[in-house]
Image: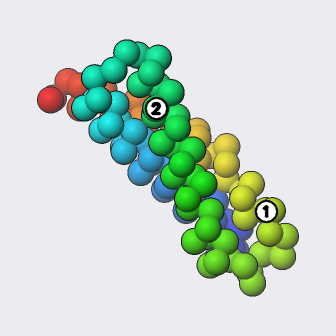
Amino acid sequence: MTPVVQLYWIRVALGIIAGALSAVLALFMNLTSLTTLVNCVTIALIIYLISYYPLKAMYKEKIEKQSKILSTGVMMYFFAWLPFFILFFTVMKVYF
């Protein structure tokens, strides 16, 4: 697997983890719906930006263009985050 493909799948996995964390916080914060959504999107953005620095250190020599580390998988991250956030939030809302 090439480094770009590895980075892509790491971002997908991080999107799923961010969806789970966002759902847990949304369930236990009991805020208004708009505030909860804004907080969850903020959590997803923070996780994405924090993950950039370890990934940059891991792939610095393997990927020539450093801007590609930041941009690879950004859409897939959020496309993974959104359905898993909805899934985890719904499951936790039903069972808790």
Give 54 or 10, whichever is nearer the viewer: 54
**Cβ–Cβ under 8 Å for marks 1 and 2:** no
Does residue 66 sit above or below 34 in this rendering? below
Residue designated by label 2: 39
Q: Earlier in the sequence, mark 1 or mark 2?
A: 2
Q: Name the residue at 52% across, 34% down.
A: 41
Can residue 9 be seen in the rendering of this structure? Answer: no
Left or right of residue 92: residue 60: right
Q: Nearer the viewer, residue 76 or 48?
A: 48
Q: Residue furthest bottom?
A: 61
Asked if 2 appears above or below 36 in the picture, the reply is below
Element on which disc 2 rests: helix
Residue closest to the far left: 96
- The residue that mark 1 highlights is 68
Q: Position of residue 92 (x, y in %)?
A: 23, 32
Mark 1 residue type:
Lys
Q: Quadrant of the C terminus?
A: top left
Dot 2 alpha-carbon crowd within 10 angstroms: few under 14, some 14 to 19, many 20 or more = some
Along the horizontal axis of the image, is 76 left or right of 26?
Answer: right
Residue at disc 1, secondary structure? helix
The image quarter in which residue 3 lies? bottom right
Give residue 35's position: percent from left, percent from top: 44, 21
- Residue 4 position within the rendered picture, expressed as x and y whole percent measured from the top left: 71, 67
